[in-house]
């Protein structure tokens, strides 16, 4: 993905060495960032951190949206974002975690945010759709060379 083909002509040729040096960290940078950015969302749902509703409040909100029992869906979503985010960051069971995030975000897009339109600022599906597509990329690509999956020789 980040490797340049011999026949490529760079738009900014002097940056070629920068592209070659930093190109190897692009995928891990995205994986780590995605994982770390999921963690606070899970902390809001599970623990009420960062002005979140906590498990009880999240369970009530989920039940109000038709996801019953609310406590089950709130716990699953919170754990996926908190623990799954940490796992994604580290590259542990990257593909299964990313698949779960993809499915979770598909439900969020279709079942929750779609009626509010596209833009996230109006409660629309833009943001969960972006998360779902990003997670799906890791379903396809795996954790990459700087993941625990690769370290243990198991690109799951």
Image: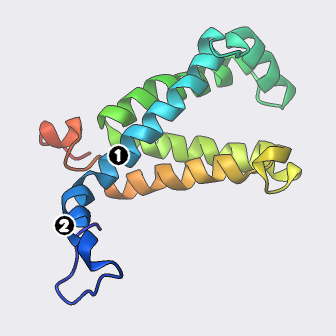
- According to the picture, the residue beneath numbered tag 1 turns out to be 29
Locate the N terminus and report the quarter of the image it occupies.
Answer: bottom left
- According to the picture, the residue beneath numbered tag 2 turns out to be 17
Label 1: state its secondary structure: helix
Tell which of 29 and 41 is nearer to you: 29
- At 40% across and 27% down in the image, what residue appears? 86
- CA gap between label 2 and label 1 equals 18 Å
**Residue 127 placed where, x, y %?**
67, 48
Left or right side of 20 for 102: right
- At 32% across and 54% down in the image, what residue appears? 26
- Quadrant of the image occupied by residue 108: top right
**Residue 149 placed where, x, y %?**
22, 39
Q: Is residue 28 visible in this depiction of the protein?
A: yes
Q: Earlier in the sequence, mark 2 or mark 1?
A: 2
Q: In the picture shown, does residue 77 fall above or below 133? A: above
Label 2: state its secondary structure: helix
Residue density around tag 2, few if under 14, some if 14–19, many if 20 or more, within 10 Å:
few
**Residue 34 placed where, x, y %?**
46, 41
Residue density around tag 1, few if under 14, some if 14–19, many if 20 or more, within 10 Å:
few
Q: In the picture shown, does residue 151 fall above or below 24? A: above
**Residue 39 placed where, x, y %?**
51, 26
Image depth: mark 2 or mark 1 in front: 2
Locate the C terminus and report the quarter of the image it occupies.
Answer: top left
Looking at the image, the residue that sits furthest to the bottom is 7
Q: Is residue 92 visible in this depiction of the protein?
A: no
Left or right side of 53 for 6: left
Tell which of 72 and 19 is nearer to you: 19
């Amino acid at each position: 993905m980040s490797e340049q083909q011999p026949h490529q002509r760079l738009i900014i040729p002097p940056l070629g060495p920068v592209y070659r040096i930093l190109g190897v960290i692009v995928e891990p940078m995205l994986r780590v960032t995605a994982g770390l950015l999921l963690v606070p969302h899970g902390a809001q749902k599970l623990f009420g951190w960062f002005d979140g509703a906590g498990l009880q409040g999240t369970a009530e909100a989920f039940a109000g949206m038709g996801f019953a029992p609310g406590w089950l869906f709130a716990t699953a979503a919170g754990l996926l974002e908190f623990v799954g985010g940490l796992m994604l960051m580290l590259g542990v069971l990257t593909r299964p975690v990313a698949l779960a995030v993809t499915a979770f975000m598909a439900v969020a897009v279709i079942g929750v945010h779609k009626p509010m339109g596209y833009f996230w600022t109006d409660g629309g599906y833009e943001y969960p759709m972006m998360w779902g597509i990003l997670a799906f990329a890791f379903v396809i690509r795996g954790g990459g060379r700087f993941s625990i999956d690769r370290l243990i020789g198991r690109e799951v």
